[in-house]
Image (cartoon, grey):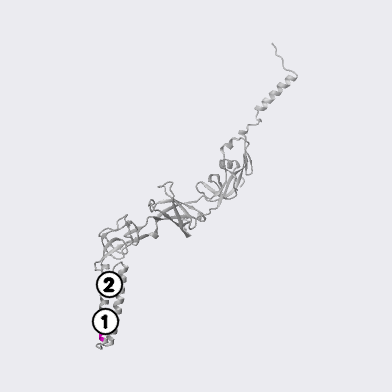
Amino acid sequence: MTSKRPSGPLLLAVLALAGLADACSGPWATPPPAGASPTVEKDRVSFAAGAAQLGSLRIEEAALQEEPPLKLTGRLVWDEDRTTRVTAPVAGRVVEIEGKLGARVAAGAPLATISSPDFGQAQSDAARAAADLDAARKTHDRVSRLVERGAAPRKDLDAAASDVARAKAEATRTAARLRRWGGEEGRTVDQAFVVGSPLSGVVVERNVNPGMEVRPDLPAPLFVVTDPAHLWVSLDVPEADLSSVEKGAVLSVASPVFPGRPFPGRLDYVGESLDPATRTLKARGSVENGAGQLKAEMYVTVEVLRRNAPKAVVIPARAVLSAGEVRYVFVEEKPGQFVKTVVSVGRERDGRVSVTSGLPAGSRVVTEGSILLAGLLGPGAGA
């Protein structure tokens, strides 16, 4: 059976449908938007609506907020205004120890007793000088009466007065020496020198044992007494953060031992010069420790809270890319279009940085996927 070929208008319609099918399947067919290549022009990258690459980008709005507080690592130490290191001003042998480690003592309380020949000599000298002064005064009184009666020459009275003056000077000298060592005039010469605490506090260190020979030039103190309710925190401030520290600033001190529990403090001292080796500045704060939970030599994290901290545009640090000395971000100008924008940024804190120039508040910044955009621009593009 022989088939009939289409002819006339029917043939033209068939050929038109066939050509349309070839056009849809040929290499010049228009691909769907999801597979469209981005358009790159200088420092701009544009994507077609619905492009698959847009799904890998994350965009956040640059907010105007207070700069985050400066965070530093600090070390807790004794408050030197409330700490004393007790030494022995005399040489001798320890015969008794009253100050026990960890004991709370009052100002003037005995810590140790030392049998000291030097102290005994001072006691003896003071007692002898007092006796000599008393004898000189009695002699002066006796000679004075004799002179009044004409039984002795005037020169004897002058000599007696000189003896009184010399004896008084020696008594004053020996008594002052004895008082400087904590001795009392008129006390029996017993060589027992009592080491007392100059202030109230807790005995936090003891470097003496019964029978130990001590002397004034020992390298370590016999006792360390301090008030642990007040501590100092020692800080090293990097040169780049000097503008964030000022005397009187409020501190928030945190220890990993007590998570979620900050301890209040205050910045009391800011150094005048940098350490030439580390390029850091010494600073010191005070911390209240009434409960005694913090301990000296603890390492802590310290936040320096600035008064009237200036506001700045703050963005995630991961949004900022570098090309040599240049820092830049990608800003969404309109949906699907991103422009490379050079910025100046401050120091990174807690994963965020403040932008000092180049980015107004409210800008929509690419925070994830910036590397993809930078790769599309190619090295040096837009710089």
- Is 140 magenta? The answer is yes
- Observer able to see residue 324: no
Using the rendered view, name the quadrant where residue 214 is placed.
bottom left
Real-space Cα separation, disc 2 to disc 1, in angstroms: 23 Å
Name the quarter where the N terminus is drawn. Answer: top right
Tell me which label, 2 or 1, sits earlier in the chain. Answer: 2
Residue at the top extreme?
1
Name the residue at 58% across, 41% down: 373
> Helix, strand, or loop for circle 2?
helix
Judging depth in this view, the residue of 370 and 214 nearest the camera is: 214
- Observer able to see residue 173: yes
- Is 315 magenta? The answer is no
Q: Which mark is residue 141?
A: 1
State how many labels appear. Answer: 2
> Helix, strand, or loop for circle 1?
helix
Boundaries of the magenta span? 137-146
Judging depth in this view, the residue of 54 and 6 nearest the camera is: 54
Residue 282: x %, y % from top left: 45, 57
Q: Main secondary structure of the magenta part?
A: helix
Q: Is residue 164 above or below residue 107?
A: below
**Circle 2 sits on which residue?**
126
Q: Residues within 10 Å of mark 2 (few under 14, many from 20)?
A: many
Q: Is residue 123 above or below residue 53?
A: below
Residue 180: x %, y % from top left: 32, 68
**376 left or right, relative to 20:** left
